[in-house]
Image (cartoon, rainbow, N blue to C red):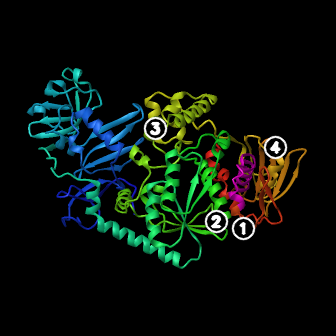
Amino acid sequence: MPHFEHGKVGFRWCDSCGTLILGQRCEVCSSAGRRFEVSKPGDLRPCMGESTKVLIELFEKHFGTSDFLRNRTVFLNKVAGEDRTDEIVFQGLVIGVLRYDLRACGFQLDLRLEGARLLHPLAKKGVVIVGHDAGHLKGKSLPGRAIKEIKGEFEAGDPLIVVAGSLVCSAVAKVSSEEALAADKAVGVRDVGKGAIEVSKRRSSWTGFVNVNEKHFRALEAKAVSDIRSYVGNNKLPVTLSFSGGKDSLACYGLASRAVDRFTLIFVNTGLEFPETVRYVQDFARKNRERLLVADAGDAFWEQVDSFGPPAKDFRWCCKVCKLAPLTDLIERNFPQGTLTLEGNRAYESFARSTISFVERNPFVPNQVILNPIREWRAVDVWGYIWWRNMDYNPLYEMDYERIGCYLCPSCLESEWRNTSRIHPDLHGDWDAHLKGWSAKSGGSEEYVKYGFWRWKVYPKKMRQLAGEIDLKLPEVRSDRLDLRWVKGVSPCLTGGYSAEGVLSVPRKRDFARVAEALKTVGQVKYSKEFEIALVKTKDSTLKVFGGGQMVATGPSPEKAHAIFEAGAKALLRAQLCTECGICVRNCKAKAITLDRGLVVNEERCNRCGRCTTACVVAHYYDKLVT
């Protein structure tokens, strides 16, 4: 399983066949390969389609050469960065880093030492030759007087190759080539090595990569198929496959078609899918004669976005509204007894998924059991398996998209969002206009949208640093956060016990009667419609909630007082921001909840187990909604 921390992880390269070895040895020449290292977690993927074009353009721009990349297998390894940041693996060497610069709104190339040594004999520009007396080079800023010759023009920040006798260095320009000779700090040297690295004459292809690793792909398939059969064989629930149109679900299709006799494809159309994805899923099901069920969210996103604000990486309310709500409805209608669903979740995708098991329960869809047969696969395993089994994949992967999902997803890369502006200017333009309008209403600037700050509710360190660099003043929290003002906080009560008093500012969308209904999931409720006040009693605590958002809680301990206060705040939010997605209804085993323009709770049936609150999108993101 992956390790998401600093460090290196080893792979092996077959120099004879010119490609990556994933198994024990090369299946073509039997070589054990040469070891090389990349940064953890090491989720290598092929560089294909327009991603290759991006690399070619960068090497041509900076060094006047790119032929060495043609007809070769090149791999990318995602590493930490502001946006897209990939190590470039060529010939079993990390020759550089491809990164998307949010300030320049474009791709940049950082050259590694191996890249400098490999390009030195080939480069027609981007080369600086210095004298032998330059002294210690690594980490040094060289003055213009040390430069003997400059090949080609460059700008400040461009990658460079520095040559000092037999030494070859990776470097970066501190100033432009025009200013270099007169500058006190002209070139910054990053790393130093000796001699050149010869580019292999061996050409390679993705077909060759598959041939080199065929035994590995066969073993991956055999294990996954065995895992699926073992679980499905002991379970009578019907089998479904979550088919998103992405590479991982496609790999799962290949496994499912060999592991079980019958299964159904489920596609969740969030209403925000790329047109290419919708067409691909439909065409794939028709071509392979598979039953396809579509859970359609319709306009759910656009109906709720004004209430919740734009989704964020740490506030993905859209997933519950646009994915889980239609999915739970589809499963309830078509599989009332439940279903076993194969999903393409991989541990290497993110830290959050790094500990997933083969069998998982969906906490929001109670009658769905998830099987994760490719949880230990890397992206390169997935692609190799797809090619080995000759399966048609989504054409968007050839257009420089690493992942396929909703076109406006806050978790997509800014580089991919720029790509969307080129491929689908209409979709990009509509969402961009909405974001700018939302930002303007709250006193924000277009730069707030341009640089992607809307993607977070709470800004991470890297975005705060970026704001400082571009002189953009950020609000402490995003403008659409709701305000909770403590009147007393939690403090000792004069009559004994402890009390908590505060005011929650929440938009008024529904009658106070709906607030009283939601409070029934907290305790026994008495309320006055005329005066808009509700009294909630539990075994040992009480809560008063007023129509204006004021709340007063009392309990025998600070923890009890705070707990019933927070439960009341969540109920107040649930009542006023309810999307009527129905997830709470399906999670209530007591069948105590119905929907009628908001929550309706049967107090006699409700056992206050809290499952409806846990399942609710509003309550789930309480800490993101409320300051």
Residue 110 shown in magenta: no
Residue at coordinates 47% horizontally, 68% vertically from top-left?
256
Position of residue 403 measured from the top left corner of the image (x, y, whole percent) = 45, 49
Q: CA distance from mark 1 to mark 2?
A: 9 Å
Q: In screen coordinates, is 314 left or right of 174?
A: right
Q: Answer few, some or many: residues within 10 Å of disc 4's Cα (few below 14, many 20 plus, some between 14 and 19).
A: some
Question: Which residue was labeled with disc 1?
Answer: 589
Residue 385, given in percent of the width and then of the height, sits at 37, 62
How far, Cα to Cα, is label 4 from label 3? Answer: 48 Å
Between tags 3 and 2, which lies in front?
A: 3
In the displayed structure, does residue 519 sit left or right of residue 196? right
Kindly identify the amino acid type of the residue bearing the numbered disc 4.
Gly
Q: Amino acid at mark 2?
A: Pro
Q: Secondary structure at mark 1?
A: loop
Give the magenta range: 562-585
* Of labels 3 and 1, the one closer to you: 3
Q: Is residue 474 left or right of residue 393?
A: right
Q: Nearer the viewer, mark 2 or mark 4?
A: 2
Identify residue for label 2: 366
Q: Nearer the viewer, residue 161 or 566?
A: 161
Magenta region, mostly helix, strand or loop? helix
Mark earlier in primary sequence (1, 2) = 2
Name the residue rendered at 21%, 33% in the picture: 64
Q: Do labels 1 and 2 touch, CB within 8 Å?
A: yes
Residue located beneath label 3 in the image: 423
